[in-house]
């Protein structure tokens, strides 16, 4: 079995980071998926692709013009484009008296459905909205499109947080503004990576899942979960080789996290039986091993199981003061979807000061010692649960 060391994590994170922007349907998505497929294929597991077809959004142009200033924008991917001539009118704070409303949100504003941004979009009377995304760097930090398959509401243009002061002043002054977006659709495909051991007729399988795509390289956001996923796959192969495996292990790295978890949707469409059949779904969420914020959150249906994972993390060297066991009600991302569908979930997620920011890259925001600790803890958890 490979040694899950900081040196191993360094090598693998650099490889992932080097495969390019990992947005679904892009060359970097395919390259990183093939990389992960190759990494999993040497672990004595049956490894394959689960195709995921989508109509990818291609942004030809998107911007706002106000006070003789043009600001480049990114449309929300689950909102419609503007008409061909754009939308013009008075600018105001959202809810005010103007055609185009303004609001500010953090990039995790749509980590699950039903959050304030979604409610605002459903209730707004404005013809269009401008949303500044708030990040530590002031750069554009895109918000996930939870309703990608069913867009709703008025057009919404996202802009970098560095423009907040200017936009706040223009909204307060009820300035004239024009917003424009041109979006076309392109039929394309991505894939989930799946790995499995042999089946056991009478035993509940163990499922390990992690998202693998994001808005940019998303290195700290995604790499830690993928490496911990690989560690779980490695342990599964070892248990099978040594005839110590007592239940089937199924591992899925899903695409389309940023577009409403469409990879998970396809997985559930094909394997809905696993929702209640599986002994546990181990959800390896975002930001497992960031340098900018070491905080780690564990959520489990059975709180004792959460404390067991916490103990494993600490035993493998993760700093105890940064590991918290939280109520399952706080679970987000794909883990939240699985809980709502009736699955028994243990979820791990971290924190990231550069969440959804293009600067979330190797090496500046990566804690390879933390990733190695998390990976070892996941491998030990799999061994305990499946042998």
Image: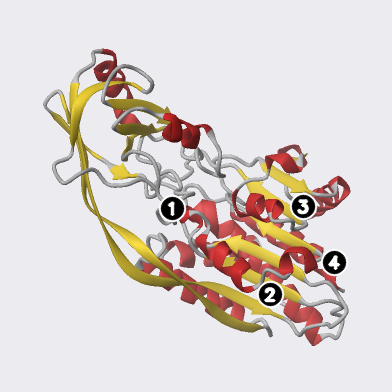
Q: Which of marks 3 and 4 is nearer the N terminus?
A: 3
Per the model, the C-alpha gap separating discs 1 and 2 is 43 Å
Q: Are marks 1 and 2 in contact (CB under 8 Å)?
A: no
Indicate left or right for 3 with 169 as reference: right
Q: Is residue 342 visible?
A: yes
Q: Which colour scheme is used?
A: secondary structure
**Is residue 4 shown to the viewer in this render?**
no
Q: Residue at x 65, y 49 (%)?
A: 336
The image position of residue 307, as x and y in percent, is: 84, 47
Q: Identify the disc placed on residue 313.
A: 3
Question: Measured along the vertical axis of the image, is residue 139 above or below residue 216?
Answer: above
Q: Is mark 2 on a helix, strand or loop?
A: loop
Q: Residues within 10 Å of mark 1 (few under 14, many from 20)?
A: few
In the rendered image, which residue does mark 4 sit on?
Answer: 385
Q: How far apart are marks 3 and 4 (CA)?
A: 16 Å
Q: Which of marks 1 and 2 is in front?
A: 1
* Cα–Cα span, label 4 and label 1: 38 Å
Q: Which residue is drawn at 57% across and 44% down?
A: 112
Q: Do the residues labelled 4 and 1 touch (CB within 8 Å)?
A: no
Image depth: mark 4 or mark 1 in front: 1
173 vs 208, nearest the viewer = 173
The first of marks 2 and 4 along the sequence is 2
Position of residue 276 in the picture relative to residue 4 (left or right): right
Percent position of residue 313, x then y: 77, 52
Mark 2 or 4: the one toward you = 4
Circle on res. 150: 1
Cα distance, mark 3 to mark 2? Answer: 19 Å
Q: Along the line of sight, which residue is nearer the eye, 116 or 104?
A: 116
Counting residues from the start of the chain, the first of labels 4 and 1 encountered is: 1
> Label 1 vs label 3: CA separation?
39 Å
């Amino acid at each position: 079995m490979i040694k899950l060391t900081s040196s191993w994590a360094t090598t693998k994170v650099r490889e992932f980071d080097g495969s390019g922007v990992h947005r679904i349907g892009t060359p970097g998505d395919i390259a990183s998926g093939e990389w992960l497929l190759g990494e999993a294929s040497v672990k004595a597991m049956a490894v394959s692709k689960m195709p995921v077809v989508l109509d990818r959004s291609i942004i030809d142009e998107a911007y706002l013009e106000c006070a003789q200033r043009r600001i480049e924008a990114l449309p929300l991917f689950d909102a419609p484009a503007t008409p061909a001539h754009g939308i013009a009118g008075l600018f105001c704070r959202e809810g005010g008296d103007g055609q185009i409303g303004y609001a500010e949100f953090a990039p995790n504003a749509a980590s699950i459905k039903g959050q304030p941004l979604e409610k605002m979009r459903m209730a707004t009377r404005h013809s269009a909205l401008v949303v500044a995304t708030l990040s530590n760097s002031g750069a554009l930090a895109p918000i996930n499109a939870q309703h990608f398959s069913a867009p709703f509401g008025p057009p919404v243009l996202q802009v970098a947080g560095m423009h907040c002061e200017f936009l706040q002043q223009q909204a307060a002054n009820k300035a004239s503004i024009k917003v424009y977006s041109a979006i076309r659709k392109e039929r394309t495909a991505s894939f989930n990576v799946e790995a499995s051991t042999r089946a056991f007729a009478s035993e509940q399988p163990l499922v390990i899942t992690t998202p693998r795509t994001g808005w940019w390289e998303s290195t700290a956001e995604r790499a830690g979960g993928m490496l911990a996923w690989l560690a779980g796959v490695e342990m599964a192969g070892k248990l099978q080789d040594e005839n110590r495996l007592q239940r089937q292990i199924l591992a899925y790295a899903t695409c389309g996290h940023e577009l409403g978890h469409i990879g998970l949707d396809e997985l559930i469409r094909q394997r809905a039986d696993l929702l209640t059949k599986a002994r546990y779904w181990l959800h390896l969420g975002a930001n497992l091993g960031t340098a900018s914020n070491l905080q780690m959150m564990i959520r489990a249906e059975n709180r004792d199981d959460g404390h067991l994972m916490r103990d494993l993390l600490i035993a493998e060297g993760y700093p105890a003061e940064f590991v918290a066991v939280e109520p399952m009600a706080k679970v987000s991302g794909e883990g939240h979807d699985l809980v709502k569908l009736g699955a028994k979930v243990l979820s791990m997620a971290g924190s990231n000061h550069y969440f959804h920011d293009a600067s979330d890259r190797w090496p500046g925001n990566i804690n390879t010692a933390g990733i190695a600790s998390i990976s070892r803890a996941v491998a030990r958890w799999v061994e305990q649960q499946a042998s």
